[in-house]
Image: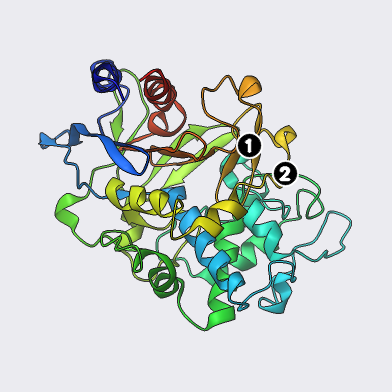
Amino acid sequence: MSATFAAALDDVLARSLARERIVGAVVLVARDGEIVYRRAAGLADREAGLPMREDAIFRIASFTKPLVATTALKLAADDTIDLAAPIATWLPDFRPRLPDGTAPDIALHHLLTHTAGLSYGFLEAPGGPYERAGVSDGLDQPGLALQDNLARIASVPLAYAPGTAWRYSMATDVLGAVLEAATGMPLPQLVQREVTGQLRMRDTAFAVLDETRLAVPYADARPAPLRMGDAAAVKFIEGYAHFAPGRIFDPASYPSGGSGMAGTADDFMRFLLSLRTSHRGVLQAAQVDRTGVQAQTQGPGWGFGYLGAVLGDPRLAHSPQSPGTLQWGGAYGHQWFYDPAADIALVLMTNTTFEGMAGALPRDVRNAIYRG
């Protein structure tokens, strides 16, 4: 990439920090399997004046999903699970119903693609069904047990018949429960065995392995982001996303397959680059758009595969990325993508939600990368 590429990315970060849209960030860009840009910017703890560091640990939220999905795909490859099988095979008591009272079969495939008919509380208006049932999105309610949350999810009618639509959801938390039941292993040990351990992702786990490097989380606000306390509610889409940053320190909190891990930018880039070689089969499975661009999973032009959104139509998406690009974010303020055709990977981790995930910053970083 050109000499102006790094300067352009530096400028994007500097403007975001100067406008107080984010507090701190770590950005890694890889091209042809090699890191071509690495930068820590801003502050990990604004009040203490601690600068962001390249090996900062973040609560990675939905960056957890592709790691759990990869675990499932590897178990399917060795015939431990069958993606076409109904999840009642392993979770006989988890039988959410349609509004007409029927209980349709939900397949593992539906969980991986978020086509099971489940939802998230922040996709609903305040007082919606998930809030009334007390469902945790996996980011709050420290100490909540998995079986309790599964029972709450199952008590809410499905939004649609499985396989007939797409809706981002608690599906990966349910998937984690299936994987535990199918293997007899706790989800944290299973993900470590199948993914993070093999890739030497030493800082990525369902716990914070070095608290001295943990970035403080902040929430979008004007004129500057607000430091999160023990609990925070941040407006997003139709409702509010509820955060309890201390949840990850509570051993009684269930390991959320959708949002429960912590880790570093370097670790996650190691995972993305593994899709080029050691997990090439996972990449090939993940690049199949199983919902169609009408699902608009990241806006117009995007469908969904097994690891995240799949770009089907760059023109509709107004994106410089190639068809087949995989992309997703994390609610604490992160975004990643991997463009196999151009062989470009991005890991953007910030400590500011939701700007780092869905604000101007990830778009501006993406555009600067492709202009380079």
Mark closest to the chain's N terminus, 1 or 2: 2
Image side of residue 131 versus residue 47, left or right: right
Q: Position of residue 127 (x, y in %)?
A: 63, 42
Cα gap from disc 1 to disc 2, whole angstroms: 9 Å
Label total for image: 2
* Badge 2 density bin: few <14, some 14–19, many ≥20, Cα 10 Å: many
Picture residue at 58% right of the left edge, 76% below the top: 78
Front residue of 134 and 345: 345
Mark 2 belongs to which amino acid? Thr
Color theme of the render: rainbow
Which residue matches tag 1? 297
Which residue matches tag 2? 291
User: Quadrant of the rendered structure where residue 116 is?
Assistant: bottom right
Picture residue at 42% right of the left edge, 23% below the top: 370
Q: Position of residue 49 (x, y in %)?
A: 10, 34
Front residue of 187 and 38: 38
Q: Position of residue 18 (x, y in %)?
A: 23, 16
Secondary structure found at label 2: loop
Q: Is residue 290 above or below residue 12?
A: below
Mark seen at residue 127:
none
- Tell me the quarter of the image containing the N terminus: top left
Picture residue at 82% right of the left edge, 53% below the top: 161
Mark 1 belongs to which amino acid? Thr
Secondary structure found at label 1: loop
Q: Badges 1 and 2: C-beta atoms under 8 Å apart?
A: yes
- Tell me the quarter of the image containing the C terminus: top left
Q: Can the viewer see residue 104 in this picture?
A: yes
Query: Which mark is in front, 1 or 2?
Result: 2
User: Quadrant of the rendered structure where residue 111 is?
Assistant: bottom right
